[in-house]
């Protein structure tokens, strides 16, 4: 059995104070939840205060990205050991907004993935097709290349630390959700790409306009093991409802 992971990606939203307030409310609303993992990924400046705010609760903190070098002359970048020191457990890698606006490629995803594992962070690697690619029937080809190249050369022992998030780009922040059947088709395809030893254990999250109203039907699918939630994670009651669905 895979324990569900419900993860919130706050993107470039919320100040330090706002982040702490939402996290305290969320931790209180979800304090009795034991059968699923709960994660929030705030902005870099809020990470340490966020981690302090949820210490001793069942809410974990993650970052939205990391750089592959550990330190040095890389202005504006943040490394894995720095995220660990700030209290992060997880890190999102290769989000479609990083791919679309910041030139992220499967190659840089792979570098970040290896750096995250080396630092002791649990990576959440995002994959997903654009609307144009879906309309051209290229979804499986695109997702396969992202999984194979983004996660290449992983040691078997490291695979069990990895989470994959399937996020159809056309469903992110658009209000359009993949139907449970559309999502499950890709999730089960991704599971088929995994090494035999971890096929049954790696969690595959769905992301793309997940909200309290659609979480149940998505989570009912065999290969959907959690959610990566943007907009609906910014309000504690909404995200708590998603967590507790
Ligand atoms: C995301 O950014 O990972 C995401 C799924 O966003 P939203 O839930 O807002 O579509």
Image: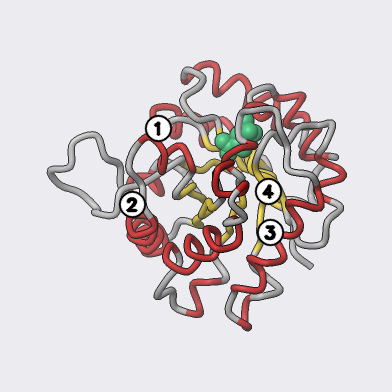
Instruction: Estimate the spatial distance between the alpha carbons at disc 1 and disc 4, rounded to whole Å.
Output: 24 Å
Determine crowd level at label 4: few under 14, some 14-19, many 20+ residues with C-alpha closer than 10 A.
many
| Residue drawn at the location 58% of the way across and 79% of the way down | 195
Q: Nearer the viewer, mark 3 or mark 2?
A: 3
| Residue drawn at the location 61% of the way across and 37% of the way down | 170
Q: Upstream in the sequence, badge 1 or badge 3?
A: 1
Q: Nearer the viewer, mark 1 or mark 2?
A: 1
Q: Nearer the viewer, mark 3 or mark 4?
A: 3
Point out residue 210 in the picture as x, y percentages from the top left corner: 72, 36
- Mark 3 vs 4: CB contact within 8 A: no
Q: Upstream in the sequence, badge 1 or badge 4?
A: 1
| Disc ID at residue 44 | 1
- Name the residue nearer the viewer: 130 or 100: 130
Determine crowd level at label 2: few under 14, some 14-19, many 20+ residues with C-alpha closer than 10 A.
many
| Residue drawn at the location 51% of the way across and 19% of the way down | 14
Pointer 3 residue = 186
Quadrant for the N terminus in the image? bottom right
Instruction: Estimate the spatial distance between the alpha carbons at disc 1 and disc 3, rounded to whole Å.
Output: 31 Å
Helix or strand or loop: what does disc 2 sit on?
A: helix
User: Can residue 105 be seen in this snapshot?
Assistant: yes
Helix or strand or loop: what does disc 1 sit on?
A: helix
Whether 180 is drawn above or below 31: the answer is below
């Amino acid at each position: 059995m895979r324990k569900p992971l419900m993860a919130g990606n706050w993107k470039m939203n919320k100040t330090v104070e706002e982040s702490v307030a939402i996290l305290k409310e969320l931790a209180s609303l979800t304090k009795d939840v034991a059968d699923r993992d709960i994660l929030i990924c705030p902005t870099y400046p809020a990470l340490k205060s966020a981690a302090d705010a949820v210490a001793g609760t069942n809410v974990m903190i993650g970052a939205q990205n990391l750089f592959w070098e550990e330190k040095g002359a890389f202005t504006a970048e943040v490394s894995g050991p720095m995220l660990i020191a700030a209290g992060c457990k997880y890190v999102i890698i290769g989000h479609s907004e990083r791919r679309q606006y910041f030139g992220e490629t499967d190659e840089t995803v792979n570098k970040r993935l290896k750096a995250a594992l080396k630092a002791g962070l649990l990576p959440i690697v995002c994959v997903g097709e654009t609307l144009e690619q879906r309309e051209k029937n290229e979804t499986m080809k695109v997702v396969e290349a992202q999984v194979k190249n983004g996660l290449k050369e992983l040691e078997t022992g490291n695979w069990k630390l990895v989470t994959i998030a399937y996020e159809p780009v056309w469903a992110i922040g658009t209000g359009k959700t993949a139907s449970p059947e559309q999502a499950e088709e890709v999730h089960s395809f991704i599971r088929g790409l995994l090494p035999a030893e971890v096929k049954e254990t790696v969690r595959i999250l769905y992301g793309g306009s997940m909200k309290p109203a659609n979480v149940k039907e998505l989570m009912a699918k065999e290969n959907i093991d959690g959610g990566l939630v943007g907009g609906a994670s910014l309000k504690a009651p909404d995200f708590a409802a998603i967590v507790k669905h």
